[in-house]
Amino acid sequence: MPALETVLKSLPPTKVIDATIEYSQYMLLDLSISNQELAKNKPQTSVDFEIYIDNLLTQAKAKVAFGGYLEERNIYKRSENFNNSTTPERNIHIGLDLWIKAGSSVFAALDGTVHSFKNNTSLGDYGPTIILKHTIENQVFYTLYGHLSLESIVNLKVGAVFLKGQLLGTLGKPNVNGDYAPHLHFQIIKNIGDNFGDYPGVCSKIDLGYYSNNCPNPNLVLKIT
């Protein structure tokens, strides 16, 4: 049986937000600790971050900012979910972010069923989240869609079927999405364990080996670059 990564590489590209936007209108966004421009601007709030990202999109004449897989970031320091005295700091992002306006459509990456969903309400968390279960070539895996609107999980049911490209939900505003500039956190998960409606999207350096293996690069599915 081929490895999941091999299976995903063989699939045609797919889009998880506004399919009318071509990949040529995407720009790579660096939110890493090494980004001196970000350090200079020092955006503190979700509004500050949205302004920062919108300005970059305008300058690049782009419509979507993307990136962040295995990126080490400082933006999680504000939340005890990631930064407290009892556990190692979690600051390495293990999904891929797609930054675009709140209300933008989110689509299922592949044919699948709803594994679980939940509103993760802590500061810096996902807010409304949907996890789909997929089976391709005997490989069972999951895709996670975080920072959605509350409407996205209303009347949703575990086991509901979604086809590739079918509308899954919409992006949430900061007051419901964990207090971030609007964006989709998209993540692939091999072994989800007993997690329900949630799965770590940020890990510590000491756990990076496990999570980078269990959560392959989402660009294997999207094929933006």
Image: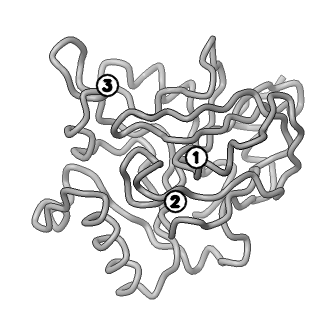
> Please, what is the three-letter code of the amino acid marked with disc 2?
Leu
Figure check: 217 above or below 189? below
For marks 2 and 1 on the same chain, the one whose residue lies earlier in the sequence: 2
Residue under label 1: 186
- Mark 2 touching mark 1, by CB under 8 A? yes
As helix, strand or loop, the secondary structure at mark 1 comes to strand
For marks 3 and 1 on the same chain, the one whose residue lies earlier in the sequence: 1
Figure check: 164 above or below 18? above
Number of the front mark, 3 or 2: 2
Kindly identify which numbered label has been placed on residue 99.
Answer: none
Q: CA distance from mark 3 to mark 2?
A: 22 Å
Number of the front mark, 3 or 1: 1
Image coordinates for residue 116, horizontal then vertical, percent: 70, 28
As helix, strand or loop, the secondary structure at mark 2 comes to strand
> Please, what is the three-letter code of the amino acid marked with disc 1?
Phe
Residue under label 3: 204
At x 37% / y 76%, what residue is drawn?
54
Quadrant location of residue 35? Answer: bottom left
